[in-house]
Amino acid sequence: MRGLFLEELSVGQSAQLLRTVGETDIVAFAAVTGDTNPVHLDADYAATTSFGQRIAHGMLSAGYISAVLGTTLPGPGAVYLSQTLKFKRPVRIGDEVTARATVTGIDQAKAEVTLATVCLVRNKTVLDGEAVVLVPRQAA
């Protein structure tokens, strides 16, 4: 399995994936990361917050961006160098999240690609940012 080589990328290329956030996703994410904030796991506690109900970890949505970069664009072989994130809205259990990455710049000398990253729920931005990844070159 291989991803795209630097030479195969162009500004404007885009890829996305869809994931529906389930109860098991939130519980598993809490177990793996150790983030047991009750706003994610305790319905009674979450009801007392401004959200009124449990919400998914913001980094769960960010993980969907990582999945796009690591599996599709550029895909296997790409190495994350940086990621900025702005959390705009909460994601709730049952929400379908669209994670999208779009190539916005290519540094041929460094073999680095910059991508606009966004997660949407019902066509509203819940998270956005920018990623930079190192991409393998095609063998000469």
Image: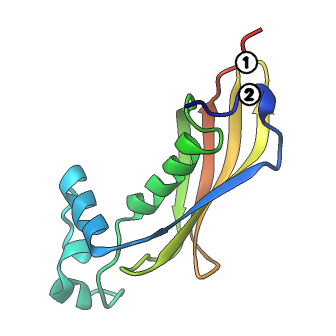
Image quarter of the N terminus: top right
In space, the residues marked 2 and 1 are separated at their CA atoms by: 7 Å
Q: Tell me what residue is drawn at x 80 percent, y 26 percent.
A: 7
Q: Amino acid at mark 1?
A: Gln
Q: Position of residue 82 (x, y in %)?
A: 54, 38
Residue 23, quarter of picture? bottom left
Q: Position of residue 114 (x, y in %)?
A: 70, 40
Q: Amino acid at mark 2?
A: Leu
Position above or below: 118 against 104: below
Image quarter of the C terminus: top right
Q: Which residue is mark 2?
A: 6
Q: Tell me what residue is drawn at x 77 percent, y 18 percent.
A: 109
In this rendering, position of residue 70 left or right of residue 73: left
First in sequence: mark 2 or mark 1?
2
- Whether tag 2 and tag 1 are in contact, CB under 8 A, the answer is yes
Asked whether residue 48 is in view, the answer is no
Q: Which residue is mark 1?
A: 138
Q: Position of residue 116 (x, y in %)?
A: 68, 52
Position above or below: 44 against 66: below
- Mark 1 crowdedness (10 Å alpha carbons): few <14, some 14-19, many ≥20: few
In this rendering, position of residue 60 left or right of residue 109: left
Q: Nearer the viewer, residue 139 or 33?
A: 139
Asked whether residue 126 is in view, the answer is yes
Q: Tell me what residue is drawn at x 53 percent, y 35 percent.
A: 80
